[in-house]
Image (cartoon, helix red, strand yellow):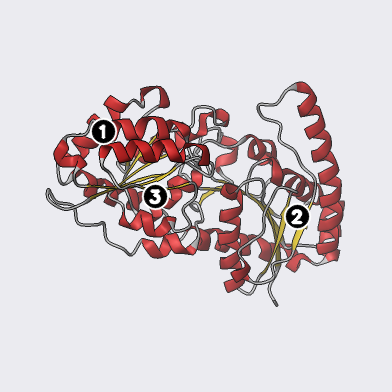
Amino acid sequence: MTGPLIVLAAGGTGGHLFPAEALARALLSREARPVLLTDRRGGAFDPALGDVETHRVRSGGVAGKGLVVRALSVREIAIGVLQARTLLRRLAPAAVVGFGGYASLPATLAAVMLRIPLVAHEQNAVLGRANRLLARGVDRIATAFPSPRHLGAALRAKAVHTGMPVRPAFALARSRPYPKLDEAGPLRLLILGGSQGARIFSDIVPEAVGRLPEEHRQRLGLAQQCRPEDLERVRAAYDRLGIAADLAAFFSDVPERLASAHLVIARAGASTVAELATVGRPAILVPYPFATDDHQSANAAAVAEAGGAWLVPQPAFTADGLAALISSLVRVRETLPEAAARAARFGVPEAAERLADLVMTLAGSNGAGNPVALGNREAA
């Protein structure tokens, strides 16, 4: 690679790693050299990307922890900052991109200390705590949503709405038209529950399906993600209803399933919302109520306000309520296709390219990341 070296700081969960991977692809197409800096929990990029250099440093979560665990986590983060500082001085990157979460903190804090150009990507509709901590030291805040909460007036000048990078398969699925929906044809329902599934979907959805009007239930084609421990009881519930449901703890072909779905029921994590909007499919979103700063409710509200989804708080997610909502959405033939179009307009399929443009522009101001320039910035 002849282009600049860009460090991508991401880890913890796929929700942070997937957008970093999408950005890595876009950077590689620009002849840049992406390097992944993650924590011990973080996975690796898709092997199809090639041999992306990966480094691991220590880190730890703080939100929602007890005092002892918090103290230990702060210690781990401090050690990780020292490790990241040493690594960044050796690599001399042209820029660092942090993808939020405490796994990215050591690298991003070290970048602030070394005065390396830094982009913080915020994937939720609420500025996360890690990004709030960094906000004053970053050069740019790339946002997945147009106006995330907690982005005060002083930070708005740094904010650029790039959208949320998604894996290429979701962008490709966007070209698929919304499936034909008429009174006699199939009604395909897809239920996703995040990386671990959602027990409440296993509890509520089969019961709600049993309460649908017969003319709707007979048309139903259903695929549902379940926790492994819930699979058998959910399968038994659908068997009693005479519905041949496709159940699994993990779907490896979510882009294809989204493209084929008429309606999705899901949590409102940042990746899920971005994938729905990229493909352009309507959804009933049930935010996880214990998400930090209730960010899933904010994510869902943004899509609902755009007309691409219906937000149902978990306490209101009942079998009777869900059956009534599905029936009302299906009864008027134009409702779901119109919501699909609005979801697609909300999406930013070129998010990875937008973010890559931002990063490359910022990297260009860094003297190509040479050690002399890096040392000068630290001394400044």
- Judged by depth in the image, the label closer to the viewer, 2 or 3, is 3
Marked residue nearer the N-terminal end (1 or 2): 2
Q: Is residue 373 left or right of residue 318?
A: right
Name the amino acid, label 2.
Ile
Task: Tell me the crowding category of disc 1: few under 14, some 14 to 19, or many 20 or more residues within 10 angstroms, Cα based.
Answer: some
Q: Are marks 1 and 3 in contact (CB under 8 Å)?
A: no
The first of marks 1 and 3 along the sequence is 1
**What is the three-letter code of the residue carrying label 1?**
Gly
Residue 53: image location, x then y, percent: 73, 65
On the rendered structure, is 253 left or right of 238? right
Q: Which residue is mark 1?
A: 210
For the residue carrying disc 3, how many other residues have a C-alpha within 10 Å: few (<14), some (14-19), or many (20+)?
A: many
Residue that appears at 83% across and 57% down? 87
Mark 3 residue type: Leu
In front: mark 1 or mark 2? 1
Q: Which residue is mark 3?
A: 276
Location of mark 2 (residue):
116
Q: Label 2 crowding class (10 Å Cα cut-off): few <14, some 14-19, many 20+?
A: many
Which residue is drawn at the image coordinates 59% and 40% (left, top)? 155
Q: Nearer the viewer, residue 118 or 65?
A: 65
